[in-house]
Image: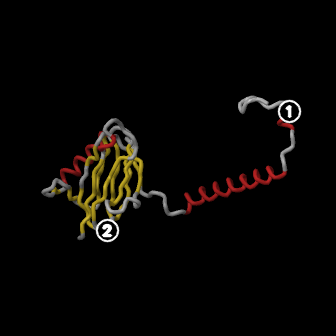
Amino acid sequence: MGGPLDEPDGNWWDNPVNRRESIWLGIAGAWSLAIFGWMSGFTRFGDQNPIGQTYEVDPDAYQQRVAAYKEEADETEEGRLLPPGDSVYVGGRRFDWDGLPVVLEAGREYDIHLGAYDVQHGFSVRPEENLSKQINLQVFPGNEWVVPMTFEEPGTYRVICNEFCGRGHNSMSGHFVVEEA
């Protein structure tokens, strides 16, 4: 008898498959098709897919949009931005979220404009008190993604980069401060 990596003796591929093995192969095949169908259907009809518009934009042009937004926004004593309207611009760059921190009103819908200046970043937002509630989005250079968001509960919402972007990746964070209107 050979080792586990040795080729079996004879014409092993011509041997009939045991009936029990055929049943289990059928069950596994049917289950695979069912899971594939569920996954495919849920991406079409489920309510978990991110929404919003995406646009192609030059990274330098997007950086200028974020800079113009920051100039137009008011600033608190703590250095947090107060958006001038319903649009909030956030730009990802190694190793910082440009346009954060920002103060938002609870219950108000904002259009969060996301883009990257240099490399791909992961935009993960989660409340400080409940880390199991979160949204994860991918931000790419050359694209602007406008995502409508409403923060229902006041508090601090941490923003981290969850896509490795270089040596300082672990320090890439920011936050939204959501206050009652």
Tell me the amino acid under the disc marked 2: Glu
Rounded to the nearest whole Å, what is the CA distance between mark 2 and mark 1? 67 Å
> Mark 1 or mark 2, which is nearer the start of the sequence?
1
Q: Pick the residue in front: 51 or 16.
A: 16
Q: Residue furthest front?
A: 1
Classify mark 1: helix, strand or loop: loop
Residue 177, label in figure: none
In this rendering, position of residue 78 left or right of residue 45: left
User: Label 2 crowding class (10 Å Cα cut-off): few <14, some 14-19, many 20+?
Assistant: some
State the scheme by which the image is colored. Answer: secondary structure
Q: Which residue is mark 1?
A: 11
Q: Position of residue 69 (x, y in %)?
A: 23, 51
Q: Which residue is mark 2?
A: 153
Q: Amino acid at mark 1?
A: Asn
Note whether 49 is above or below 164 in the view shown: below
Q: Residue 140: percent from the left, percent from the top?
A: 39, 43
Which corner quadrant holds the N terminus?
Answer: top right
- Figure quadrant of the C terminus: bottom left
Q: Secondary structure at mark 2?
A: loop
Q: Residues within 10 Å of mark 1 (few under 14, many from 20)?
A: few
